[in-house]
Amino acid sequence: MLINIADLVRVYFDIPPSQTLRYVQEEYGHLFEKGKRCEADIVFIGVGKLRKKPRYVYFVEPVAYDDESVFWYDKMGRMARIDFENFQNKIIQVHIDFEFDSHFLGIIMEYLISFKLLKHGACFCHASAIEYKGTRILFPAWRHAGKTNLMLHFLELGARYVADDWVILYKDGSVLPLPKRLHLLYYNFMTYPSLVKGLEPEARAMINFTQKAMEGEYDLDWDVVDAIRQRIRYRRPIYELGAEADYDKAQVGMIFLLQKEVTDRNVLEVKRVTAEVMSVLTQPILYFEQMHFHSAYAAHKIRSGKPVPYLEKRNTMIADVLQESYKKIPFLYEVSFTAGTDVKKIADLIVKHIRKVSRV
């Protein structure tokens, strides 16, 4: 099974029928094409049961290494081994347990795609994206800053869906989405209760139970309630929400970087920034989202003493792509707001700036 990412990166899955393979088919099925393993840049090879060698070291969760290689491990201890020594070659191989955590597998795949993109003058940007009033707009943000809720609100205003999580940003200022299902968390369902429609009865019951527990209806320890809330993750195709999608490559017209602040004062403001400032603000977000990859590569260098020249340049290459891209995008803004600010107020402020720009 071969996945084609915009003719830039191809990923091959040599995995027998399993929960992991079903996840890949559901998440990235629209990117499938006919092809051979030798045509891929990244190959995932399923193994019945991967095991640690007798001598192993836990580096930093969820990364470890042994006499064979560096590996990631999921919550159940199942493994995904990566061959860093061949990273610069055409094909990167990752051996995974058949039942390796599906969500984590998707994250690892996106790590590898991201670093393969750099040689094509592109990189990932952690952002939701919409097409609104004829303009493609990005909302980069740290995790849990509200980029999905803001995107959902703009869909209610008539915007077209482009992306919810990752986009591929090119040096020329254009962007291409990585189309996959919406990743919805507990607070998305609380802000938009209509999202619950269409979920399986068990999923609706879990969300309802968690809401009542959050309100104190059940005598549960808060840590238990919070752990349940954090585990609520459901994926839904955008068409199930009745929204239109735009998956074509297009020039970005505006960026609104979302900055959620934890402060006692009320903050809700927009300020224009330069390409250099936008690059400085978004690079740490990308680094954080790829932290498990960086940790694995650090473990590889400690284990083998062999740096990979291509990966040694990755941060410089990312900075170059981002800064060059932002220079081609006409309007760059930073939106600061207090944690808990109503998403409608944030959207109203952004719409005002969009209208102001359209009159220029």
Image (tube, rainbow, N blue to C red):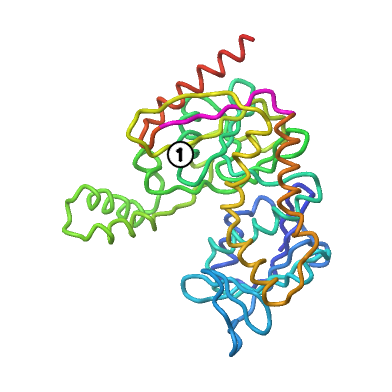
Q: Nearer the viewer, residue 279 or 144?
A: 279
Q: Quadrant of residue 59?
A: bottom right
Q: Nearer the viewer, residue 141 or 104?
A: 141
Q: Quadrant of residue 179?
A: top right
Q: Is residue 36 above or below residue 154?
A: below
The residue wearing badge 1 is 146
In the image, residue 333 lies at what x, y percent?
Answer: 58, 27
Residue drawn at x 53%, y 40% is 141
Q: Which residues are magenta?
A: 328-337
Q: Is residue 357 above or below residue 278?
A: above
Q: Is residue 231 above or below residue 175?
A: below
Where disc 1 sits, the SS reads loop
Kind of residue at disc 1: Gly
In the image, residue 109 lies at what x, y percent?
Answer: 65, 60
In the image, residue 354 lies at what x, y percent?
Answer: 56, 19
The outermost residue toward the top is: 359
Is 335 one of the magenta-colored residues? Answer: yes
Q: Is the magenta region chiefly helix, strand or loop?
A: strand
Q: Nearer the viewer, residue 302 or 73?
A: 302
Residue drawn at x 54%, y 24% is 271
State which quarter of the image contains the N terminus: bottom right
Q: Nearer the viewer, residue 27 or 357?
A: 357
State which quarter of the image contains the C terminus: top right
Is 296 one of the magenta-colored residues? Answer: no
